[in-house]
Image (spheres, helix red, strand yellow):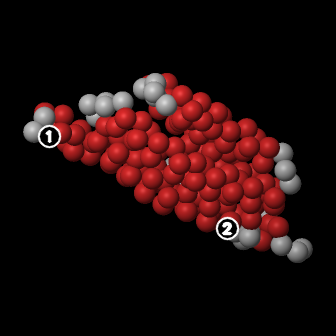
Amino acid sequence: MPTTTLNTPRLETPLLKWATTLGWAGVVPFVVLASLGWSSPQDALMRPFALGLLSAYAALIAAFVGAIHWGVALARPLDDRHLQRLALMWGIAPALIALGCLVMPRTWGLLALALVMLLARAMDGLLWPGYARAARAAAWPDAEQWNRLATTWLQLRTRLTAAAVLCLAAGWASPHFGAP
């Protein structure tokens, strides 16, 4: 059995544990800000401020999840030029779309940002398996690790996306947007 195969799980586990820990830590601002959107009537001034921050934070996270694709494409150039171009183009799309969401009326912007999060997860579902296939096709020595990374990353992304979308929906449904 090659050495890389024996070492892969040991090397992969700490990285994925850190990614998981940091990913869930990144959900905390979503939860806190969405919760503040439901603050008591005495804190009515806090609601629009918190929901504005929720929108801004969601836009930042959308930019981050898109930018990951630039990192992948630039760190290890892919033999599949179509996949590489798609990764680079998609890498900037969430930031640009999210920017548009920030200038919408906040009620629509929160919903649009939730859709951006879902779209970003859908694109991850398209691109990450493509990266794993490209690694196998190019006979990269760590091709199997790319396959496991794609699978594990997509599972984590699904959970993180669900949490973010639920928080954006909670912000949208908050009393701030209700009738006076």
**x and y, in percent, of residue 149 in the image:** 36, 45
Callout 2: few (<14), some (14-19), or many (20+) C-alpha neighbours within 10 Å?
some
**x and y, in percent, of residue 144 in the image:** 29, 42
Residue 11 is left or right of residue 120, and the answer is: left
Q: Secondary structure at mark 1?
A: helix
Quarter of image, res 170: bottom right
Identity of the residue drawn at 18% across and 34% down: 4
| Residue type, mark 1 in image | Leu
**x and y, in percent, of residue 138 in the image:** 36, 30
| Residue type, mark 2 in image | Ala
Name the image quarter holding the C terminus. bottom right
Residue sitting nearer the eye, 127 or 155: 127
Residue sitting nearer the eye, 90 or 160: 90
Q: Which residue is mark 2?
A: 170
The Cα–Cα distance between marks 2 and 1, rounded to whole angstroms, is 45 Å
Which of the two discs, 2 and 1, sits closer to the camera?
A: 1
Name the image quarter holding the N terminus. top left
Identity of the residue drawn at 56% across and 52% down: 121
Residue 77's place in the image compared with 169, above or below, is above
Q: Secondary structure at mark 2?
A: helix
> Residue 6's mark?
1
Pointers 2 and 1 in contact (C-beta within 8 Å): no
Quarter of image, res 34: bottom right
Q: Point out the residue furthest to the front here.
A: 137
Q: Is residue 51 visible?
A: no
**x and y, in percent, of residue 163 in the image:** 55, 62
Residue 74 is left or right of residue 135, and the answer is: right
Residue sitting nearer the eye, 3 or 173: 3
> Residue 55's mark?
none
Identity of the residue drawn at 62% across and 56% down: 118
